[in-house]
Amino acid sequence: MLFQEILSRLDRFWANRGCVVAPPQDTEVGAGTFYPTTFLRALGPEPWRVAGIAPSRRPADGRYGDNPYRFQYFYQYQVLLKPSPDDVQTLYLDSLYALGIDPKAHDIRFVEDNWESPTLGAWGLGWEVWMDGMEITQFTYFQQVAGFDCRPVSVELTYGLERLAMYLQGKRHAFDVEFAPGVTLGDLRRDMEVQHSRYNFEESDPELQRLLFDKFEVEAYRLLGKGLVYPGYEFVLRSSHAFNLLDARGVLSQTERQGYVQRVRRMAETTARTYLQPADDAEAGPTTARGKGA
Amino acid sequence: MAELLFEIGTEELPSWYVARGEVGLNDLLSSRLAAAELAPESVRVYATPRRLAAWVRGLPESTPRRVEERRGPPANVAFTSEGGLTKAASAFAAKNGVAASDLVRLDDDRGSYVYANVPVGGELAAELLPELLAGVVRDLPAPRKMRWGDEPTPFIRPIAWLVALLDGRVLDVEVAGVRAGGRSRGHRFLAPGEFEVGGGAEYEGELARRFVVADRAKRRAATWQAVRSAAGDAGVTADEAPALLDEVTDLVESPFAILGRFGDEFLELPEEVLATVMIKHQRFFPTRAAGGAFAPAFVGVANTHVADEGVVRSGYEQVLAGRLYDARFFWRSDRRKSLSQHAWGLSGIAFQKELGSMADKAARVGVAARLLMDALGIEGAEAEAAKQALPVFRSDLATEMVFEFPELEGVMARAYALAEGLPAATAEALYGGVRPKTHEDGVPTTPAGAVLSVADKVDKLVGFFALGKRPSGSADPFALRRDGLAVVRVLAERGWPLPVATVVEAAAAAYADGPVSVTTEVQDAVVEFLWDRAASLLTDRGASVPVVRAAVLGSVTVVGAARRALLLEALLQREEMPDLLALYKRAANLSRSEALPEPVGSSAQPVAPGQGVKPELFQEEAEPRLLAALPAALAGAQALLGAAKAQLPGWDIRDAAPVRLSGLEGAMQAVVSLKAPLDDFLDSVHVLSDDLDVRRNRLTLLGEVVRILRQLGSLEQLAVG
């Protein structure tokens, strides 16, 4: 099954189960969890279902394209169901079926894996899903986001698309996966992976990234102070990426690193507070930050 | 008598929780039933990744009936002057549901009151159980619970279904948004449908037919049997790996073992690397060939039986091969450099911004380790091993293998050291020097490794404390408590006569040239921090808090404190001890006007008892009697310490002492025999005599008593009153 076919089947499957199939976010994120459609929508009481491909960047995970599984730029498939439905495990297994994977023909296991994002002030409990010994999906019941208790609880499913595709196509390296007829993932991403790995580890300018972090942070607070949740949050994401680049460059000591994590976390918490504020304020009426855009 | 079947069906529980849940359900259900006066004849529990269940037999149908006597108002309030009942008495009768005429008057030493004899009990189990069972679900202990959906009640993982059957009838239990019924579910993939549960006697069999081995012990045995026979069929032997077997047992409802293979070429990897990749990353059992060396095969345990086992096998093999391929790549590329070359890379790895790089740290650890060896008089081969290890200590942090598999730090240093021809003792020191990494991990097995381990960890503690980054409350972001625990475990296991303060001084001395200044206040704080860790380990092993405080405050070495804790526990079994402790406390209070003797460490030489006491100043008979009793008491205390040291030269105080102290009777008798003369002395002698010479002499004598008894610990921590 071609990579693009996997994508469209997952889109179709989740669309049929009431999900908005949302296009990807266009700022850098470390994972689909950072998408406003996940991070913000997991807050507050309103039901919400969203799915879609979530390209993500983790600069420190670059391996110049050598490692078959690990990349600084990769595709997740991100699903958020709020509130978490009772039959979510069955739903998930059905989605595998939609990809031509018969759960009865494989050793499928839900192995405890708890998730925590110190930068988002978020944590959840759940599993990694193993298929024949390979981790293919992260399954998380969000308990807290940005320090706020999630009520109701959302469940997040994150499929590792490269791994799934490798498995379905029997490839040993993600770059050998056929994306479209005659075009591999390597054709699409290898040069980028090699060059970005060089950039992340050798060429990025730490002083510039420190400066950018500081400026993005100021801008984030300025915008959030005016109630501009979405533009403000984008600057939180940019700060977070600048931190990730510094981290990959190996220039942060343990305490400095902690300091940056705390700063991103405070920004994330301010974002969440700003986003939730109108809900606590009955007089604000229906024109809340929420409900407009996603 | 009735029987109850209660099953909590869940989404997959964490594997480490299954065994705990089994115990937790048994304990909580039993105690709640007992508290409700419904104690059953037996409770049998079942636990799998998807269910916790209990089969309760011999359950009373109702709580026992009895009559409870309740006291009402005093007679003078209950009766009018004419002898009739007052309103207060009638109200009391009504409140307790008895007729006013049934109230009785009783006169006893509490006075004269009216009483109601109220029949209680007889509540039906069927009526009490729904709320009781809901409470069990709500209160089942777990370190971390979660919420799901809109449901506010947390549990370990979402509850999918409940079964609650009392003699085959469904109980109306509702908790966490789930209503109990009589239907359970079989294996997730092999028998996914619901089925009617017959009853407790049928439960296990009904599940077995649906591919669920509900009894945890049976499932563990079946898992090991499956693993062994899959290995045996291929002519290899599976490694026992009990921790892995526990984990795998609780990852499946039914075990299906599958043997897979990997390429011979990966056998060039050290066994620990192969084992780490197989066990930690894939939960596979390594196997060995006839000679005992690793075979290129493994056993994985699937949760399900598939039509074509080849699909699962090839998945297992492909994932494992990917990881082994990486590992072999690192193994080869790392060995292109020597460990000394890798050690250069430590200057590029930050230890902590203000404390320099890992290379800076390694230099400090070298200084501290040499000081410790001098203090301990370690020389010869062990000193040589440590000195050879120091220049390359922790150099494996700079290797690719440890970058990818951080848990192999130390393991790789040893493997690379052996591969480049360094002596085995040096390699072992490099391995031991980073241990214990966790509470479960063992301590270094050689003195050289222990020296490196202590020097390395105390360097971190001293540095972080100097930076003001001490743990507070539950916040310990740099895992300093873990390091502190490791240090006291190593010190105790070695049985070194090395005062805790000396260890900290050695680490502090290594900071003499910076980068931070280590004040005596910082050193004292680290010493106290280490003692707190020792105390927490000793109390974890069951010693009482006062005993541990007495042992710790009366010792300078960790192993001394550990031995004293055991001695004091033994002494406290003696009936004379409470009196002796009270007398000791009086003696200590009185003699406090003189300088209190310093605690005497196990390494101190015995000092003649009664030194400084002038018999010519004695006026009362009790004085010479007490003086005469001192040598035997001192000998007893010394004998106790000596016996403890001989029987327990050293042990890992994470664990219970490996032997029970024995043969202490005579020495204990000698110590407690001090009670009579001391009692007599304190009773009949006016210590604070107006004659200052006499007073000083009596205080000196009491000071000697205190000094002798304090060899066993700071006994004032134990005395009551």
Image: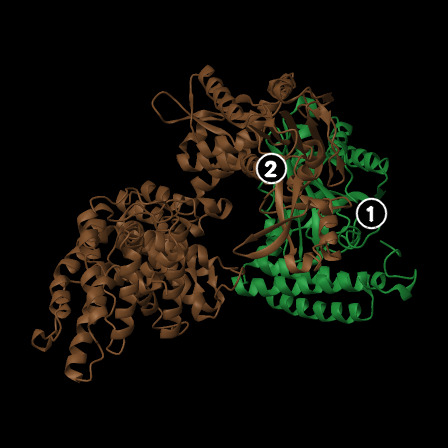
Chain colours: A green, B brown
Is there CB contact under 8 Å for labels 1 and 2? no
Asked if residue B714 shows in the view, the reply is no
Q: Residues within 10 Å of mark 2 (few under 14, many from 20)?
A: some
The quarter holding residue B251 reads: top right
**Residue to which mark 1 is pinned:** A23
Amino acid type, callout 1:
Pro
- Looking at the picture, how far across and down is residue B65, in whole percent? 63, 35
In the drawing, does residue B37 fall left or right of residue A267? left
Q: Secondary structure at mark 1?
A: loop
Label disc, if present, on residue B37 of the rendered structure: 2
- Looking at the picture, how far across and down is residue A164, in whole percent? 68, 34
Residues B641 and B637: in front is: B637
Q: In the figure, B66 relative to B3: above or below? A: below
- Looking at the picture, how far across and down is residue A102, in whole percent? 72, 24
Chain holding disc 1 = A
Label disc, if present, on residue B720 of the rendered structure: none
Residues B589 and B249: in front is: B589
Q: In the figure, B155 relative to B709: above or below? A: above
- Looking at the picture, how far across and down is residue B713, in whole percent? 28, 61
Q: In the figure, A208 relative to A164: above or below? A: below
Q: Secondary structure at mark 2?
A: loop
